[in-house]
Image (cartoon, helix red, strand yellow):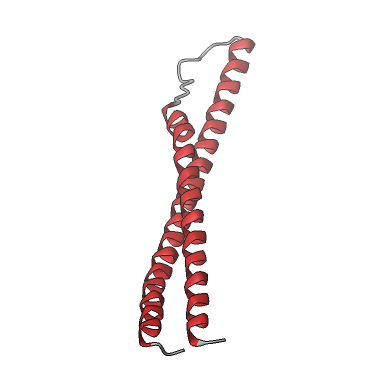
Amino acid sequence: MSNVDALAARVRALEEKVDEADGYARACRAALVRLRGPLGTLSAVSVDVGGLRSRSAKVDRARSRAESARQVVGTARSRLADAAGDLGRIAGRYERRADTARAELRAARKQLAATVASGVG
């Protein structure tokens, strides 16, 4: 394998690495955008059972269900926020990988062009 062939193979491999990292970063950002809607909706949910005071068993059951629903909403909101944070961090990691691979790709392309121009390899 000539030097030019080796450099061309390196350029192709780096192009694939950039494409892969960019694809993962885009997918994470898209999922993050889709999570923001439900997260915003859940953040707007407020369950106040403070005014439900009664000696009625039906009211007590309703208050208990409402308190349970408040806990479920809070847990779901927390888990969605955690997932959104994770996706943001993962996307950032892949964006940095893509940037690093892009810099390596520019250098490899320059090296390939110089090798081809010099006629060596």
Viewer-side residue, 8 vs 43: 8
Q: How many marks?
A: 0
Q: Residue at x 48, y 70 (%)?
A: 14
Residue at 48% x, 83% y is 4
Q: Nearer the viewer, residue 60 or 94?
A: 94
Q: Quadrant of residue 101?
A: bottom left
What residue sits 46% from the left and 35% below the top? 39
Which percent across, then down, holds residue 111? 38, 81
Which percent across, then down, holds residue 22?
46, 57
Q: Is residue 84 above or below residue 101?
A: above
Residue 99 pos. (x, y %): 39, 65
In this image, 103 relative to 64: left or right?
left
73 vs 106, left or right, is right
Residue placed furthest toward the front = 119
> Quick check: 25 above or below 46?
below
Residue at horizontal 49 percent and vertical 38 percent from the top: 35
Rendering coords of residue 115 (x, y %): 39, 85
